[in-house]
Image (tube, rainbow, N blue to C red):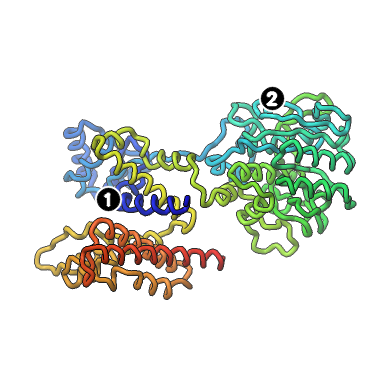
Amino acid sequence: MRRLLLLVLFLVGLWAALSNFKGLANKGEYSSIVLDFRDNLPTTVISEQLQAIAQKYNKTATLNSIFSVSDNIYTLEGDEQLLKALRHSPLKKFVKHIEPNYIYRAFEVPNDPDYGKQWNLRSINIEQAWEDTKGAGVTVAVIDTGVSRVPDLQQTEFVEGYDFVNDKVNAADDNGHGTHVAGTIAQSTNNNYGVAGIAYKAKIMPLKVLSAGGSGTISDIAEAIRFAADKGADVINMSLGGGGESLVMKEAIDYAHQKGVVIVAAAGNSNRNAAEYPARYPHVIGVAATDLAGKKAPYSNYGAAVDIAAPGGSNDGKILQETIDPRTNQPVFMGFQGTSMAAPHVAGVAALIKASGISNPDEVLSVLQKSARTVSEDPFNHFGAGHLDSTAAVKLALKGKITWKDFFRWLRDNGYLNPRFWIDGGVVALLPKILMVIGSYLFYWFLRNYLGWNWALNSGLILGSSGLFFLRGVYILDLPQWPFRLASSSIPELGNTIVGSPMLNPLFASALIPFLLIALLLGHPQWKWFAIGTTLGVASCLAVSAVMSPAVLWLGTGAIARIFLIVNALLCFGLAYLASQGEKRLA
């Protein structure tokens, strides 16, 4: 029922969006206008035009910068009304472009002063991932030397942990290793202090199993795993390891996995052709380390049981976080290197994936591996599935999901949060605008999640749905008009355009041409998207025609024509879906 409702909303909204084409335009934010004068214009002519603008509109245009002299690019303050006026003024004869001076913004960059030193976070592409999630609602258990609440963890939420070494509740760190690991996962971020963490809205569960010297027993580690699973941890990070298989440990890992916990462990620092335990166990994600250049870190284990690679650092660039100095127990920012540093990157991204709605640990691993940046030549499995990519992982986790956050971000980016958009036209225009916005978003969401967006798809959509409709009003004396009529027609309209009839020809206004295009072009890497886009465009045109004016040659203008158009529209949607699914299977 839910899918049927979404389909109905999609079709109704798609019609509204296409019939109000401006709603699909990229309405970015701007407060100034760009005037790109022709390169061959004399400076005297440009000066005359600038003076005319100043006199008529009381606006002063200036060179954008000293580097704009040769390109003749000027800017002036202005809004949509001034933009329209300039585009319809005599100025248009002297310029190449008159367009909004859109404002672009960086993806979320935290205000932590030392964030610029965290090459590792940028190498996993974290900033765009933060646009969708920061890990809220997820608990990550750090099974390590304990975690101390250093200043850059003060805003990070902690849940109750345990010290299995000393058998007490307070799991403070007396080594510095565990606090550093916890910082990579969830260091307090956007607090104008120190550095950033990956899933900085996630909760930390500190579990101390390693002594001040950095060693611990498998019995304590196994107990900590069970404790984390029973106390609601979603992700476990174990930046520790050694030789020797343990059934006690394996049973604890299987127990946590059955309870839906994602378990991450470091591969080890011996530069050997196999990960150490616990990374070697089934249901554990084994993480190898990369250096500043993205190559295998010199110390990192590789080969068997390595599932993915993440930044671990090297002498050329270490992983910076705030931790404690074990000699003084005082906070200090330190750079560490090791697969111990690589594992929490994966644990942090696993928390982001969990926060995006993926709960099954096997599915989390699948998302991590499918979204990783693959390494083409990796005969010794240095990198597993490839380099960790947090943005790609979050996007894959969210694929096919409609979220309010994504919807409101889309509203913001397309200018729909401007009150004037909703007020202009009064109450009568409100419902069509709501349908238009919902349809535009669903159309964008569908293309982004299932088909991608490229020039071939875009061209096909235009050809199939509307053609170059703006050419319909073009009339040039003594020239034949049929080329303009053809170019301004969609595929379903070609038949009636050729014969001069107002009724759609059923051969063109059907799934026949889309079927032939997909059959011919599906094997081509680019043109298949043109075929898919054309099929979707034809589907939307037929759907709109069925609602607005069901007139089909030989079928009349009544219910039979409407049913014919709707059936063929659905067939086209089905063809486009099958073609895109076939492409996924081939990939």
Q: Residue at x 34, y 42 (%)?
A: 434
Residue 439 position in % (x across, y down): 37, 49
- The tag on residue 96 is 1
Query: 422 above or below 24?
Result: above
- For badge 2, the amino acid type reads Pro
| Badge 2 element | helix
- The tag on residue 151 is 2
- The tag on residue 42 is none
Residue 531 position in % (x across, y down): 40, 67
Mark found first going from the N terminus, 2 or 1: 1
Q: How crowded is mark 1: few (under 14 residues within 10 Å), some or many (20 or more)?
A: few
In front: label 2 or label 1: 2
Query: 139 above or below 537?
Result: above
Answer left or right for 61 relative to 291: left
Q: Which residue is drawn at 60% across and 43% down?
A: 122
| Badge 1 element | strand
Question: In what quadrant of the picture does the C terminus appear?
Answer: bottom right
Q: In which quarter of the image is residue 75?
A: top left
- For badge 1, the amino acid type reads Lys
Q: Residue at x 57, y 33 (%)?
A: 110
Residue 35 position in % (x across, y down): 28, 43
Residue 455 visible to an observer of this rendering: yes
Residue 299 visible to an observer of this rendering: no
Q: Do the residues labelled 2 and 1 touch (CB within 8 Å)?
A: no
Residue 300 position in % (x across, y down): 78, 51
Seen from the viewer's position, the closer of residues 446 and 156 is 446
